[in-house]
Amino acid sequence: MYKILEREELTQNIFKMVVEAPRVAASCLPGQFVIVRSDKDAERIPLTICDYDRVKGTVTIVFQIVGEGTLIMADLKAGDSFHDFVGPLGCPSEFCNEDIASLKEKKILFVAGGVGTAPVYPQVKWLKEQGVDADVIVGFKNKDFLIMEDEMKAVAGNLMVTTDDGSYGRSGMVTKVIEDLYAEGKKYDVCVAIGPMIMMKFVCKLTKELNLKTVVSLNPIMVDGTGMCGACRVTVGDKVKFACVDGPEFDGHLVNFDEAMKRQTLYKTAEGRAYLKAKEGDTHHGGCGNCQ
C-alpha cells in the first residue's frame, strides 16, 4: 500500500497528492509517469509525475476529475493509501540524456496548458538544478483555474501566465504569447508543449512556421498505460507509436494530432473501440501485438 501523506485541492476538480513511494522516487526522472489504482478493483490511471523527493521517498501527482476513477481518487484523504502505485514508466525527458554544458547553451521554452502545468514543472525544476534557465508560458481558461504559479516561479527563468479571458496575467491563448515573444526578437532552440491535445496541435502548427523544434507529451491519450489497450496508438511521421511504451514525448511536428484526437473520441464508446480493433488489426495493441 502507498500512503497519501498530503492531499490538496488546487482548484475546482484539480487535486495534488504527495504519496509515499520510495522505490519510484529513487529512480524516476522528469517526463515519466506512474499508474495508480485506488483499490484492487479500481480503474488503472496513468499520471505524469509532477515532483519527487528521493530523500523523503515521495512522489507528487496532480490530476483532474474526468471520470469515475479520478472521482474516486479525489475522495481519498491524507492517511489513506493507494492499492497500486506503479512506476516509473515511459521514457524520461530527452533533456535528461543531453550533455549539461550543451544544455546551458540552449534557449528553452516550455508551454503548459491547464493541468499540463504539472508535468512541465519537474522538467523545469530539473533543468534549474543543473544550472539551466528556461522560459515558461502557462495558460488557463481563467484565473479560477490557475495552479502551481508559485512553484513554477521558483524554478522558471521567466514565467508568463496567460488566461483566455484576460482575468489574470496576459490575455489570450499561449500561441499569442509565443507570437509576441518572437515579435519582440526572442528566439529559442527548443520548445516543450504539454497540455490538451488541441493546444499542443496549434502550438506545433505555429512553431513549425517558426522553425522551432517542439516536443510534446501525449500522456492525455493514455488509458491503460502498458500498450495493451491500444488507446494511445498514434502516427508519428509514417510510423505507428504508442504513447505509453514509446513515449510519452514525441516530435510534435511529426504527430498526427487530428488522427489522435479522432481516436480519443472513438475510444470512449464500446462501439468505437470495436471499430478501432477491427480496423487496425494486429497494430491495434502496442504491448502484445495481437487482439485476443
Image (tube, helix red, strand yellow):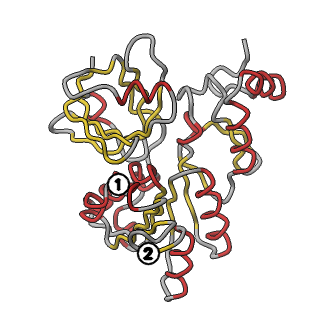
Residue 112's tag is: none
Quadrant, the N terminus: top left
Q: Secondary structure at mark 2?
A: strand
Give the residue number, with chain letter if any, for mark 1: 147
Mark 2 or 1, nearer chain start: 1
What is the three-letter code of the residue carrying label 1? Ile
For this orientation, the residue located farthest to the right is 279
On the image, the x and y values in percent for residue 54 come to: 21, 39
- Report the front residue among 252 and 82: 82
Residue drawn at the location 39% of the way across and 69% of the way down: 168
On the image, the x and y values in percent for residue 147 come to: 35, 54
Give the residue number, with chain letter if any, for mark 2: 170
- Report the front residue among 14 and 292: 14
Q: Is residue 70 above or below residue 29?
A: above
**Can residue 135 be seen in the rendering of this structure?**
no
Left or right, 159 with respect to 212, comes to: left
Residue drawn at the location 34% of the way across and 51% of the way down: 122
The quadrant where residue 145 appears? bottom left
Q: Is residue 221 above or below residue 182?
A: above
Left or right, 261 with respect to 130, comes to: right
Q: Is residue 72 above or below residue 147?
A: above
For this orientation, the residue located farthest to the left is 55
Q: Secondary structure at mark 1?
A: loop
Q: CA distance from mark 2 to mark 1?
A: 15 Å
Residue drawn at the location 41% of the way across and 32% of the way down: 34
